[in-house]
Amino acid sequence: MTWEELEQLPEEVAARIELWEGRVVWLRRGPAEHQAFTFALTSALKRCAKSAMSEEPGACWRVDFETNVFFGDHGKSDFVTPDFLAYRCLDEPYQDIRADDALLVGEVLSPSNKQTDIEAKKARYAGGGIPWYWEIELAPHRSEIAFVHAYALETTHGTLPPGVTPLHQANYILAGKWSPDDSEVIAIDFPFPITIPWAELEF
């Protein structure tokens, strides 16, 4: 399917589709907790971005949720829709966000998410060169976040046995892990200084 064909579909159908190099990938609707924690993370990151910009004149970042990120320099038939993202401010309003613009993308994972689907989407983000990827893991039996994982993009690979080549040329390496049980805040300095108290993420 092309972007032009996607635009002809009813909005409620088109909104649940990603195009991976023209292949239709359906987005699952998560439970109420998924939406609540997506909004909470977006709000917290937006606060952090504004604070960082006030301390660093000339810097400009935006934070949004459920916004398409397009791969390549042109065309719109290859895109993903992260649950939340941070990106460089664009030159003009209403422009498409390209993978080169994105600094951080994240997914809120419900207990029903399949690991194969998670890894496939993570590989898409890495292949697009997005520097940071976050996973928000929800508790299976409680309306709360169990873990936050922050992954940094690795564009080189280690030494492999002769004749072995990596399946993906870029991959994510775990760079931070937090849970309400072992930390008071989520704190990391990339892609801008981020400090989020757990109380800000309550359901």
Image (cartoon, helix red, strand yellow):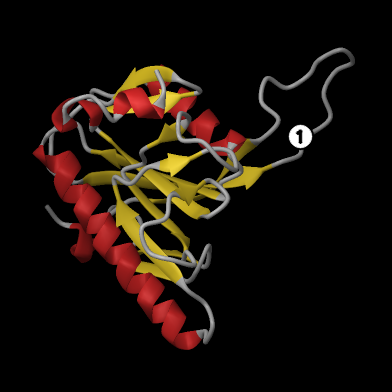
Residue at position x 76%, y 34% from top?
157
Residue 87 lies left or right of residue 158; in this view the side is left
Tell me if mark 1 has few (under 14), some (14-19) or many (20+) residues whose alpha carbon lies within 10 angstroms of its own.
few
Query: x, y (%) of residue 169?
Result: 71, 30
Residue at position x 79%, y 33% from top?
158
Where on the picture, by quarter, is residue 68?
top left
Query: x, y (%) of residue 20?
Result: 46, 24
Residue 190 visible, this angle? yes
Residue at position x 36%, y 38% from top?
81
The three-letter code of the residue at mark 1 reads His
Secondary element under disc 1, as helix, strand or loop, is loop
Residue 166 lies left or right of residue 202; in this view the side is right
Q: Is residue 203 above or below residue 72?
A: below
Most foreground residue, 83 or 194:
83
Where on the picture, by quarter, is residue 18?
top left
Figure label count? 1
Residue 139 lies left or right of residue 71; in this view the side is left
Residue 198 lies left or right of residue 104; in this view the side is left
Residue beneath disc 1: 157
Query: x, y (%) of residue 80?
Result: 41, 35
**Considering the image in quadrants, where does the N terminus appear?**
top left
Residue at position x 53%, y 46% from top?
99
Query: x, y (%) of residue 35?
Result: 16, 44
Most foreground residue, 71 or 62:
71
Most foreground residue, 171 or 183:
171
